[in-house]
Amino acid sequence: GFLISYVLTLFWNLAIIVVSQLDPHLHTPMYFFLSNLSLLDLCYTTTTVPQMLVNLQSSHKTISWAGCMAQLFIFLGLGSTECVLLAAMAYDRYAAVCHPLRYTAIMSRSLCQLMATASWLTGITASIVQTSLTLRLPLCGHNRINDFFCEVPALLSLACADTSINEAGLLVGSVAILPVPLGLILVSYSYIGAAVLRIRSAEGRCKAFNTCTSHLAVVSIFFGTGIYVYLQPPSQHPQDKGKIVSLFYGVITPMVNPLIYTLRNKDVHRALRRALRRQCWM
C-alpha cells in the first residue's frame, strides 16, 4: 500500500511540474506556486517513505543516528516551507478574486519568486533551529522511536535530560510556522468571502468559489494534522494516534494534493491532453 501511494505521489507531482513548465497556458502565478508545492511533496515523501518501506520489509527496523538527523532536518524544513507557501498561495487567490483587473500587476513574476524564496528560507531556518536543539539532547536506553520516521516529538520522548527548553522552542517554532500562516490564510479568505458575496450572478460566485476550494481543502488537511502533532507537549502526546496522524500528513497528503488540485481543474486537463497529443504525434 505504501509503495503504491509513493509511486502515485511521484507520478502525479512530477506530471504537474512537467506540464506547468511545458505548457505556456500554465505560466501563471497559481501554477508557479503549485509547481513549488509539487516539488515540496516529492521531496517530502522521498525523505521518509523509502526508508519506511525498507524497515517494513526487514525484521531489524533501524536507521542510523546520522540518517535520522538528516531525515529530521529535511522533513522539518520541507514541512515548514509548505506552511508558508500555502499562505503565499492564499494571497495569490486573494489577488485573483478581490483585484481581478490588477491581478497581473500585483502578482508580478518578481513578487512570486520573492514569496517562494521566502517560503523556502523560512522553512530551512526553522529546521536548523529545531534540529540544533534536538541534537543537544542526550539519548538513553535502546533509542526506540515509536513512530514511522524521525520527528521532534518522538525524539524528545527518548531524551534522558530535561526537555523543557526543547519543548518551549518547539512550541514557539510551531506557533510561528503553523497558526501564523494559517491566520494569514484565514484573513485572505475572509476578504475573498466578502468579495464573492458581492458578485451578483450565481455563475460568477460559483466560478470565484471554485478557484479557492482546492486550496482550502489542502490547507484544512495539512494544517489540521500538523497542529494536532506539534501544538501539544510531547509528554502529553498520544503516541499511537500521533503516529497515524503523522503518517497521514507525511504520506497521504502529498499523494492527494495533486489530485485535489487537478480533479476539477479544466486548465490542467486541457494541458495534459495537449501534452499527450504532442507525445502521440511525435
Image (cartoon, rainbow, N blue to C red):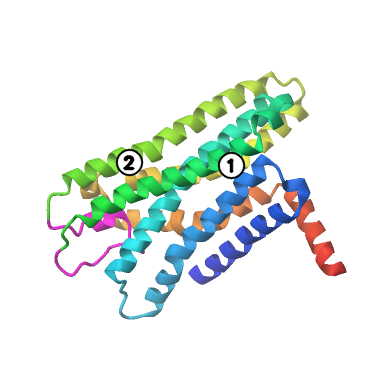
Instruction: Reply yes or no: does residue 39 show up in magenta.
Output: no
- Is residue 244 shown to the viewer in this render? no
Q: Where is 67 relative to 244, above or below?
A: below
Q: Vertical placement of 29 versus 247: above or below?
A: above
Q: Which residue corresponds to mark 2?
A: 173
Q: Nearer the viewer, residue 277 or 115?
A: 115
Which range of residues does the magenta coloring cover?
A: 140-160
Quarter of the picture containing the C terminus is bottom right
Q: Left of 34 or right of it: where is 237?
A: left
Foreground pick, 142 / 77: 77
Q: Dot 1 corresponds to which residue?
A: 113
Sequence-wise, the earlier of marks 2 and 1 is 1
Residue at point 53%, 60% (across, down) = 42
Residue located 36% across and 56% down the image: 73
Q: x and y percent of residue 186 in the render?
A: 50, 30
Residue found at the very far right of the displayed protein: 281
Q: Where is residue 168 shown, x and y percent of the image?
A: 23, 41
- Residue 40, can we see it? yes
Q: For the residues marked 2 and 1, what is the alpha-carbon distance in whole angstroms?
A: 24 Å
